Structure formats: structure tokens, C-alpha cells
Amino acid sequence: MKGKQYSAKYALIYTSLISVVFLIPLFFYFIYMKNIHSIKNELLLKEKSFLVIKAMQEYNQNEEYFEYPRFNTFQSGLYNEKFEPIFSLIQYKIKYFKDAYHLDNNNAYLIVKLPKRRYFDAKYLIVKNQISFSIVYEKLMLILLSMIILVFILSIYFLKSFAKPYKKLNETLDNFIKDSMHEINTPLSIISVNIDLYNRKNSANKYMNRMKAATKVLSNIYNDMDYLIKNDRLKHEKEEIDISEFLKDRIDYFSEVGKMKELKINSQIQKSLKIDMNPKQLQRVIDNTISNAIKYSYENSSIDIELYMKEGQCYLSFRDYGVGIENVKKIFSRYYREDTRKGGFGIGLNIVKSIINELGIDLKINSTLKKGSTFLYIFPVMPQKDI
């Protein structure tokens, strides 16, 4: 599906660019066609003027009256030297008084100079009609539309052709990642379970605790990767969650990770707070925020976590005392890391951003370099259920 959207998107961009490039020659073509159409109209006016002159030449002065030629779509008239009408069927006010072809918007007229004192003392014959360029516009639009459709179809075809090897490579890579993730999950679970069994049978061991903490860090990375892979295929159904208990469980989970840096996680959690959210998405938000707070905190410092209700909304705050954030806007970009020495892949906060944007969760960040950062999540009011 994404491949089709990609092809359509870039085909549309390419078509737009090509269309803009073709607009310049099309503009000159339009001017050319208008001139051709105008010349054809001028020839028609000359033809009608010849018919009027021919009728006047054939007029016998012995006849009682002269029947002036009339046409359905053309008007004409005889004018004296001052361009005063002697006889005229033209209702339009003539603007230009020179024997030539004139074009005034859609009004076209031809002024023909007559021999002196030959045709009813008239000096000028004027023949006029309404000229329409609609046929030129229609032809131009037909050419433009045909060109756009043709370029768009060819763009999609060539993009798909060029993208085939990359698509195949991408599918192979996706399958490799999925298989790798599956293979990683099993030994990771075995390591974690065996560490727990060892700790139950034996006294506390700092080396085992470090191994346990390391597996949790690795598990968090695994969960992020798993979420990225399955996110497009799964529908995340919401449910009512006791976020107070949920948060306590996640703090307990990361407590061993914090101990690796001699970090103390302080928490003030208001009891029995409920939100409407998918558990997996909530876990990704909380886990990635705590994980980042641990990663960028100074050793022997602390992390303060607060959960409380204010003005009908649920507030969740994470504060660390660490290196701070240099560029707040960039931290949500995928694969971006401010300090590559800290490890990770730069996908955790990108996942968090996508989730909070989808669910309308507000996030406020306050950070000072070398002093620490505060992430404050404001969850929307949970809709009231009918009783």
C-alpha cells in the first residue's frame, strides 16, 4: 500500500513539475492560435465587406431604393469622413478610426476606405462581428489535460519499474528484520527468566542484576522495533486503563536499569486515575520516556515522576537531572540522536510522537543544558460512559 502511495505521490509531483515546464511553450502556442483565429476572422470580415461593396456596385441608381445587405452574425454600416453614420446596423461604439482590422476584447471590426463620392457619399465601410476564442481555450485545455494524464501514467509506470529492484530488496530486508526479531525474542525471554530463577535460589548478585538490567534495555529496544514493524497492520483498540497501577509497574520494571547508573526514581502517583488508551501504546510512551531519562541522566542523580489530575485532565510528568536537550524539535526525528555515545537507534521518541499525535495527547518539554529536562504529557479527558 505504501509503495502505491509513494508512486502516486511522486508521479503527481513529477507531473506538476513537467506541466509547469510545458506551460511556457503552451502559452506561446495559445498566443499563436489566438492570432491565427483572429486572422481567420479578419478574412471573414473582408469577405463580408466585399459582398457589401459588390451589392453597392451592382446597384442601379434608377431603382427606387437600395436594399442594404444584412447578415446574421455580422453588422456593417457606411460612414462619412468624420465617421458619422450615413447608414449603419452597428450598435457598438467604434473606438479606433483607421482603415484596418481592429480587435477590442471580443469585438472585431474592419474599416474599409471607399472611393470618394462613389457609394452614397460614404467614405468608410465598417464591418463588425463578435469574435470568440472559446475553441482555442478548449483545444488548449484538451492538450494540457491529455499531456498531464499521459505524463502521470508514464511517471507511475517508470517509477514502478525503477522501484521494483528496491522494492524487492526492501521486502527482503523487512523479512530479515521480522525473522531476526522473532529469533531475538526467544533467547531474550530465556535469559530474563533464567536470571529471575537464579535470583530466587541465590542471594543478590550485582552481576546478575546488571545482566537483568541489560536485558530490560534490550527488551525495550525490541518492543520499539516490534511496534514499528506491526504498527501499520494492527488496529490499536482503546480500553480503560488504571494508569496509576500501570505506571507503578513500569517504574518497577526500570528500577534495575536505573540502579546501573546509581539513579533513584522518585514517584508521586495519585491513586486510581483512569485513561482511555491502548495498553501497548501507553507502554511505548512511558517506557521510552523513562528509558531516555535514565540514558541522559547524570550518575548518582534522580528521576522524578508525577501523576496527577488537574482541571479534569490527567498529567504525567518525567523530570531528569542530566545533560538536557540541545535541539528539542529534532529529538522526535527518526534515527536522530543528540549523543551517539549513549547508544540506541533514535526511534523511541519518534514512536512516542506518532502515538501522542494520533491520540491528541499534548506534550510540553522544558529543558536546560547540563541541568536536565522535563516531559509533561497531558492526556485528553476520558469520555463519560453511559450508565
Image: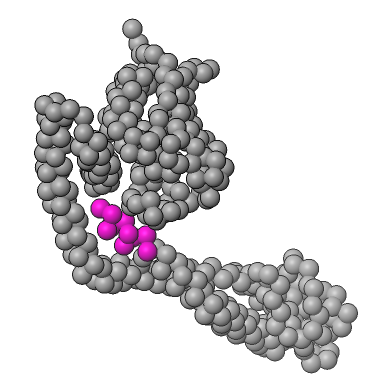
Q: Is residue 229 above or below residue 378?
A: below
Q: Position of residue 120 (x, y in %)?
A: 80, 83
Percent of width and height locating residue 97: 81, 80
Relative to 331, residue 117 above or below: below
Give the magenta range: 1-10
Instruction: Give residue 168's quadrant in the image.
Output: bottom left
Residue 11 placement: quadrant? bottom left
Is 370 in front, or is 142?
370
Q: Nearer the viewer, residue 143 or 95?
A: 143
Image point (37%, 60%), residue name? 9
Q: Position of residue 337 (x, y in %)?
A: 41, 53
Residue at 36%, 71% in the rendered image: 151
Judged left or right of residue 297, residue 48 is right
Q: Determine which quarter of the picture holds residue 80.
A: bottom right
Main secondary-structure element of the magenta-colored stretch: helix
Residue at far right of view = 82
Quick one: quadrant of the C terminus?
A: top left
Residue 298 appears anywhere in the view: yes
Left or right of 42? Residue 18 is left
Q: Is residue 263 above or below residue 77?
A: above
> How is colour applied across the structure in the image?
one colour
Can residue 65 be seen in this snapshot?
Answer: no
Q: Say if the magenta span includes residue 7.
A: yes
Residue 119 among those drawn in magenta:
no
Q: Residue at x 58, y 79 (%)?
A: 31
Seen from the viewer's position, the closer of residues 298 and 324 is 298
